[in-house]
Amino acid sequence: MYRTHSCGDIRPEHIGRRVTLAGWVNRRRHHGGVIFLDLRNRSGIVQIVVNPETSTSAHDVAETVRNEWVVQVEGVVQQRPAGMVNPALPTGQIEVDADKIKVLNPARTPPFPINEETEVEEMIRLKYRYLDLRRPRMQRILELRHRIVKYIRDFLDERGFWEIETPILFKTTPEGARDYLVPSRIHPGEFYALPQSPQQLKQLLMVAGVERYFQIARCFRDEDLRGDRQPEFTQLDLEMSFVDREDVMSLTEELFTAMVEELLPEKRILAKPWPRLTYTEALDRFGRDDPDIRFGMELKDISDLADGCGFKVFERVVKSGGRVGGLNAKGCGEFSRREIDELANFAADFGAKGLAYLAVSMSGEHRSSFAKHLDDDRLQTMMDRLETVPGDLLLFVADQPHVVFESLGRLRVHLGDRLGLRDPDVLAFCWVVDFPFLMWNEEESRWDPSHHLFTAPMPEDVYLLDTDPGQAHGQQYDMVLNGLEVGGGSIRIHDRGLQEKVFQLIGLELEVAQARFGHMLEAFEFGTPPHGGIAPGIDRICRILAGEPHIREVIAFPKNQAARDVMANAPSPADAEQLEELHLRLVEGAPIAEMMDKDE
Ligand code: ASP
């Protein structure tokens, strides 16, 4: 037996008891003739006193040990002397008087300190991820993630869900990204695709009569790793039979609300039930379909005031079918010209050709790029609409609607960060519903599904697919948390004819559809129950709940921004023999790989 207790668990009630502990040396200190070792394992830290008067041999060993060595210690728990008590440590009242120390494994000096919270370059952290994960901060994250997943499993089990694994080697399951392909050795020239999600399989489980399925599922999407993305990530994948939108949404809402209340009682859920916004409302008010509703500063449309207002830029845009949107940067009325220019540059990165402003000082004076063109009444109406008081800064973008939404929506979040309005202890869940069923793909001049191929249109909009598809709405819902889409789902098509019509609408030739999804179409002919589901992203949710800036922080072994595992150095070249077996031949020079590695 290596140990009787875990380091962090020793308490005053153990005083007088003989214990055996094992762990890592967190720190070693000399104090007169006595050596103090802080012994650490994942449960915490305990102080070991190595007194030569207790045992010279233990003292001799303690002389040799260094940080991060793995040791076993035997001794008796004792009260710390008065004045040595450390109230900041759960074990701070006691210490272990060691009489035996055994080195289980020495350690090289680690490339960064494990025993303190220092900034370490991410590249180094990822290369030595096993040491990075040894740090208490990362251990807390691993534990939180475990608790979250366990909570999900227990909750769903109680409600009659079955956890079922689905294959990783499968066939294309598109979710809008590129597939990872795996060449088949046995079938020359043929490939498996790694699932972008288990979407088809969970639907087929509904055909199979499973009724309530879930899986903590790994998904694979080969896309550029902007923002919160990883080539492989984890979803709570869930599907239910005989349900409508309401059923799926309320179950999901109940699950995550109860989980936060149990696991993170220090966090505050902004609103219960979670607010629901239509897609149009989300864009109009926040400029985004993943709105951060923790703070106000909502967008306001002033297009009606622009027509004939005297300011040519506004007039022209509105005439050409655009709109003028504004937001009130509360309390920023004293921003300098330079600060306002910085905001304009920020908006320009998201397409805004200009940022008109009106700054109202605390004493009520105006500075503005356009107000002189407007008559007093109109200006006042505009200011009233934006609920302006002295000390406010009004910002306007005039352009096509998508540019107004994108630039002002981003600017709002940027200002929210800058003004400290995005409180990490507040969890603002909301639903976005009533998305357009299809989105027009400018580049390829065709419709794309706004969610995925298998989402059903609203029943009352099915006829529009023949007449005016752009007007149809889909039966989908997005789950948003603190300004990030953390899950999406929908009620599915369960009728072969309708599924074929959707394939056709998005320009998928029937033959191609048959080759790719023939098994789905066929399954729909054997009695498919109405069904729907959702897939909340575990990584994103964990990272928000853990208060971390990126999902890499909550994934044990993530890839870097160039999709590389820098610890194991993957991907890496394959042997000529392996390629031969897989019937593959490499093309000389791989420009894409070189390019990707550069942006590390
Ligand atoms: N398969 C979808 C996704 O990965 C989620 C769903 O519709 O259930 O986004």
Image (cartoon, rainbow, N blue to C red):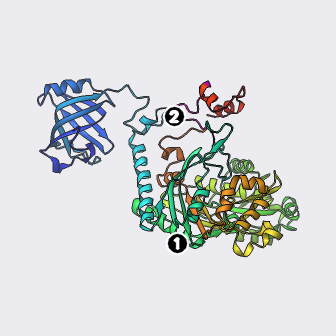
How crowded pointer 1 is (Cα within 10 Å; few <14, some 14-19, many 20+) is rated as few
Quarter holding the N terminus is: top left
The percent coordinates of residue 115 (x first, y second) are 36, 36
Task: Report the mark closest to the observer, 2 or 1.
Answer: 1
Badge 1 marks a residue whose secondary structure is loop
**Image-based side of 511 in relation to 226, left or right:** right
Q: Which residue type carries mark 2?
A: Glu
Examine the rendered structure and indicate whether residue 324 appears above or below residue 554. below
**Image-based side of 497 in relation to 96, left or right:** right
Q: Which residue type carries mark 1?
A: Pro
Could you say which disc has been placed on residue 121 in the image? 2
Q: At 25% from the left edge and 47% from the top edge, which residue is drawn?
A: 9
Q: Magenta segment, principal secondary structure? A: loop
- Residue annotated with mark 1: 273
The percent coordinates of residue 582 (x first, y second) are 63, 33
**Image-based side of 108 in relation to 329, left or right:** left
- Measured in 3D between alpha carbons, the distance from the residue under mark 2 to the one under mark 1, in whole angstroms, is 41 Å
The percent coordinates of residue 558 (x first, y second) are 52, 41
Depth check: give the residue in front, 20 or 568: 568
* Quadrant of the rendered image holding ligand 1: bottom right
Q: Is residue 507 magenta?
A: no
Examine the rendered structure and indicate whether residue 36 appears above or below residue 324. above
How crowded pointer 2 is (Cα within 10 Å; few <14, some 14-19, many 20+) is rated as few
Q: Is residue 567 magenta?
A: yes
Q: Residue furthest bottom?
A: 460
What range of the chain is rendered magenta? Answer: 562-576
Residue 110 appears in view: yes
Examine the rendered structure and indicate whether residue 322 appears above or below residue 98. below
Q: At 75% from the left edge and 67% from the top edge, which residue is drawn?
A: 301
Depth check: give the residue in front, 178 or 305: 178
**Image-based side of 47 in relation to 590, left or right:** left
